Amino acid sequence: MSLSGWVCVVTGASRGIGRGIALQLSEAGATVYITGRQETSLKQTAAQVKERGGNCVPVICDSTKEKDIEDLFERIKREQNGRLDILVNNAYAGVQAIFENMGKKFWETDPSIWDSINNTGLRGHYFFSVYASRIMVAQGQGLIVTISSMGGLRYLFNVPYGVGKAACNRLAADMAVELKKRGVASVSLLPGAVQTELVTQLVLEKETPQGGDPTVRSQQIRFSGNYFSCFSLLLNLFSLAQLKEVFANGESTEVSGMCIVNLAKDKHLMSLTGKILLTCDLAKRYGIKDIDGRSVTDYTSLTFLLSRVPYLSWLSAVVPSFIHLPRFVLTLTSNRF
């Protein structure tokens, strides 16, 4: 197996993308330490990993508590002879806060929402990265992957969310600058539309109004779209029916894991360090198919984008599928100069 003997940490692996990543890393042969705050859900992930022949170590760890994080890495050093190959910063605890304050402006919201959104999903990532890097730098190699969102490039949900996700991208990029000469890579990974448990509950199982009323905009369920797509400026153009279609054809939670497995073994990994990487791009780079054999949707494909725009969808039938949105356009979405 490609990662046999490797040691990995995946934070927030109780469910969703974190669980999918843990499954793929363990299936590739790695020993995976998974963290979360709920023992029951962690054990469920561990049991699923075991069923598939993998090796998983569930650890109750609160990403907001430095002592928990320090203890985890001390344990890894003891149990794995000081080896650590991959850290995946995935933990996030802000969904409920986003949902409860949907539609409010930042001055109308209790400022404590900042901590609810960014203590785990930003501060925690930094602390995990510090302790992981101390091991990786000492051994002269390693990979840190920070799961990100389009909210880091343009407004999405609320101010604390966008600032936190932009900071995650900057965290990955700036760590890459300091780690590169030590043989350690750091990247942001931006998944597409992912069929997480939350998305299934809030989008796929949500009843569409009769006739697919286009006035039912995605704003109503935006809080569940943390991992929507790399062209989120079209979000407000989507009806609920369209969103259901997008997510129905979305990535499984394991695509991100497949990308990380291939990325870790890439001989040219250091040429990618510091970058924001899209799962659809990595799927093309490595020839990845989803677990059910489907192709991974390319959200930068002009064919896909046109198919989602009212009155222009007919063009998607005549535009070649190999034409993509230039990457500089994504950069421009956050350009303020």
Image (spheres, helix red, strand yellow):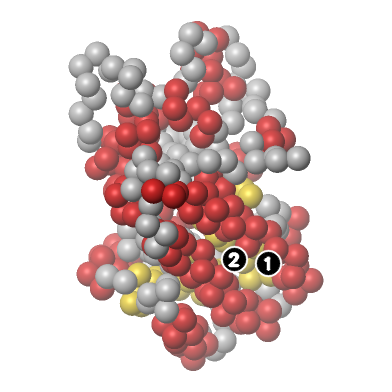
Q: Nearer the viewer, mark 2 or mark 1?
A: 1
Specify the quadrant of the image occupied by residue 116: bottom left
Distance of mark 2 from mark 1, alpha carbons? 9 Å
Q: Is residue 23 above or below residue 30?
A: above
Seen in the image, is 209 located left or right of residue 161? left
Image quadrant holding the C terminus, namely top right
Which secondary structure lies at badge 2? strand
Residue 251 in the image: x percent, y percent? 42, 41
Q: Residue furthest front?
A: 107
Seen in the image, is 66 located left or right of residue 187? left
Residue 63 in the image: x percent, y percent? 42, 72
Towards the viewer: 24 or 136 = 136
Q: Mark 2 points at which residue?
A: 144
Residue at (47%, 81%) from the top-left corner?
66
Residue 80 in the image: x percent, y percent? 50, 85
Q: Is residue 273 above or below residue 36?
A: above
Which secondary structure lies at badge 1? helix
Q: Tell whether label 1 touches label 2 (CB within 8 Å).
A: yes
Q: Name the residue under label 1.
A: 175
Q: What residue type is labelled 1?
A: Met
The disc, 2 or 1, on the residue closer to the chain's N-terminal end is 2
Residue at (38%, 52%) from the top-left corner?
109
Within 10 angstroms of label 2, few (less than 14), some, or many (20 or more) residues?
many
Towards the viewer: 129 or 43 = 129
Specify the quadrant of the image occupied by residue 332: top right
Residue at (42%, 44%) from the top-left corner?
105
Q: Is residue 149 above or below residue 91?
A: above
